[in-house]
């Protein structure tokens, strides 16, 4: 930031896992804030939250809350965004929305700044933050696509429970204790809050994230498929996804297979473009067992890539392992990056 | 078993996780045993193990241990198998070996009975039990391959720690407690005992199972690739694998992408051949959130298949999710099935 101007920022969902991370980042990065307004649902209104050594009372979000706000960062669920984002825009705020409500809307840019920052310029008041599992994947695909082309992506995910919210963390912790005590496991939330059936996540793996669609894919899988094509401006790219919830708290990992367009590439060719890519850190050395893991990525801003291998049968096929903190780059940090970009490029 | 004849059985590695499971199965299935001899390394010799309400003292395995033995079930590690399997064969025993020592040897059948039982007939004294992650995959691939052909397999695994032995279970349990107590995690064993670096597995995911090979793949990945081709008699089948260790105790899960040879197939076509396949149980109904999970597969003999979906871009592409108990079908039960087959088909 070289600007001296400061901005009025509203954070909707300020008491949630992502809202808390956003506040931490705004403070750490010395974001040019004039005034910060913390908003939430009625249920969480009245709670007090610390920001820059000051106690701020969280207010219930209403349409009027956004009067005088420059940038509003939304992460309070899709239905809240659908209701309040247009109200905020009407009052002159630019909304960065962290839910799936507007991601596939034609007039809403869906942005990972390292990948398609320029799309922000065309915003009509709302900019959507992509799904966590999509963000880290496109960050790794982008430099490869730019240099060598990509026409096929097949991903299997290894996703942390915090993607289902702070209460999912609590469920994992409780079930873990129950398992170690040889008690029966209480499953009331995962895989999907409000869905018909619940499975234990402790010491288990659940091949369902979000609800099933009519085509047999889950909504999480369809998000990865559709959002990836939109962000990469590649409607004809073949993308397939299998999304799996796993018993760890933070960071998603992804086993990704790609087919590039160029022939005869080597692992070194992929390393070359990955190690110079914005927001990507290459951690890849089998000789020293160097590769990213979810625990090592916690609280980091970057997307970590390792286990880059050439397919043994297909000259254009490559495999890799991509890890990022789902609450940071997968949510809060990407949101703040978009807000920074709005200011830096005078796109407000 | 319709035979009245009984057999002298030796179990090498009787105190290990797989050895214990083998004993349990032999007892449950009323395997036609005349005498059972429990063998181990020097370190475990002298331990007492219960079998059919009888306490049996485990003896140190020597070449002479196999005199008079009809069938020897080996699961005490590759170096022990290399040393003692030829000695057992020399003394007239048929060895079913649960290590990687002989799997790729040309004169050793590598067998999953539901898939290639007939290969046992050609044995020269040793029959190899495939790698756990391979067994469950080929069980699911075989019925599809027989009916529709398969020319491409890409798998990402979700593997339980018990695949690394009983001491890995203990490491996961200890680290889990340390994590919940906010203590530092002690990592001394995983991902690979004796390798240079160790990572915590609790609330984490490790993209390394077994040691790295010169081509950047792990030995586990190469086992899946090479063994699948051998078992399916398909040297030209394209197989790619990414193997990941996860924080659960039992059962491996696999996200598998296949390309079939036949055009125009539907999910129902795959269901049809999977639900009638030997040793395979189809658990696949998105409308009721029905799919297999590792916890549900514990102590079961079968291979469970769910989440069968047609690829959205490739008419010949399908995705599925395959789960099995890595100690049962992935090891002990497959070993006992081979022993049963030796007897039933008079292939001893």
Image: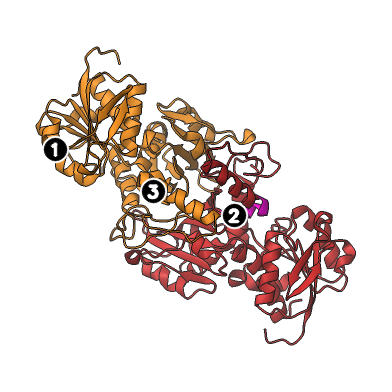
Chain colours: A red, B orange
Instruction: Identify which residue is drawn at 79% across, 67% down.
Output: A38
- Of badges 1 and 2, the one in the foreground is 1
* Residue B245 among magenta residues: no
Q: Is residue B184 above or below residue B2?
A: below
Distance from the alpha carbon under mark 2 to that under mark 3: 34 Å
- Of badges 2 and 3, the one in the foreground is 3
Image location (x, y in percent) of residue B175: 47, 54
User: Is residue B76 something that shows in the picture?
Assistant: yes
* Label whose residue precedes the other's in the sequence (3 or 1): 1
Letter of the chain that mark 3 sits on in the rendering: B
Tag 1 and tag 2 share a subunit: no
Letter of the chain that mark 1 sits on in the rendering: B
Q: Which residue is mark 1?
A: B62
Task: Give the structural element (helix, strand or loop) at label 3.
Answer: helix
Distance from the alpha carbon under mark 1 to that under mark 2: 56 Å
Few, some or many residues within 10 Å of mark 1 (<14, 14–19, 20+): some
Q: Which residue is mark 3?
A: B168
Q: Which residue is mark 2?
A: A224
Tag 3 and tag 1 share a subunit: yes
| Nearest to the observer: residue B209 or residue B84 | B84
| Image quarter of residue A262 | bottom left
Image location (x, y in percent) of residue A1: 67, 83
Badge 1 vs badge 2, beta-carbon distance below 8 Å: no
Q: Is residue A301 above or below residue B103?
A: below
Q: How many marks?
A: 3
Distance from the alpha carbon under mark 3 to that under mark 1: 27 Å
Badge 2 vs badge 3, beta-carbon distance below 8 Å: no
Letter of the chain that mark 2 sits on in the rendering: A
| Nearest to the observer: residue B268 or residue A33 | A33
């Amino acid at each position: 930031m070289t600007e001296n101007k400061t901005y009025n920022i509203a954070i909707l969902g300020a008491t949630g896992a992502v809202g808390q991370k956003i506040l931490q980042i705004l403070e750490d990065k010395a974001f040019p804030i004039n005034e910060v307004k913390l908003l939430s649902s009625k249920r969480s209104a009245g709670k007090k939250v610390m920001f820059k050594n000051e106690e701020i009372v969280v207010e219930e979000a209403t349409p009027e809350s956004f009067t005088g706000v420059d940038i509003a960062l939304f992460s309070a669920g899709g239905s809240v965004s659908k209701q309040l984002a247009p109200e905020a825009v009407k009052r002159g705020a630019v909304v960065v929305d962290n839910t799936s409500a507007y991601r596939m809307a034609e007039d809403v840019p869906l942005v990972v700044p390292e990948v398609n920052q320029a799309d922000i310029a065309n915003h009509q008041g709302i900019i959507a933050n992509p799904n966590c599992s999509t963000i880290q994947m496109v960050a790794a695909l982008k430099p490869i696509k730019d240099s060598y082309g990509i026409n096929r992506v097949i991903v299997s995910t290894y996703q942390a429970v915090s993607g289902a919210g702070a209460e999912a963390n609590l469920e994992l912790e409780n079930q873990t204790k129950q398992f170690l005590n040889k008690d029966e496991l209480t499953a009331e939330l995962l895989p999907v809050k409000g869905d018909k059936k619940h499975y234990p996540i402790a010491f288990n793996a659940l091949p369902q994230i979000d609800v099933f669609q009519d085509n047999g894919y889950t909504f999480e899988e369809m998000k990865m498929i559709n959002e990836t094509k939109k962000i990469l401006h590649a409607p004809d790219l073949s993308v397939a996804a299998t999304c799996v919830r796993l018993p760890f708290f933070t960071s998603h990992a992804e086993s990704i297979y790609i087919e590039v367009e160029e022939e005869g590439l080597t692992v070194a060719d992929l390393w070359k473009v990955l190690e110079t890519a914005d927001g990507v850190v290459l951690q890849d050395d089998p000789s020293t067992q160097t590769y990213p893991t979810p625990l090592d990525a916690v609280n980091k801003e970057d997307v970590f890539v390792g286990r880059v291998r050439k397919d043994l049968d297909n000259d254009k096929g490559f495999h890799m392992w991509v890890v990022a903190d789902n609450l940071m780059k997968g949510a809060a940090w990407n949101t703040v990056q978009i807000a920074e970009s709005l200011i830096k490029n005078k796109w407000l």
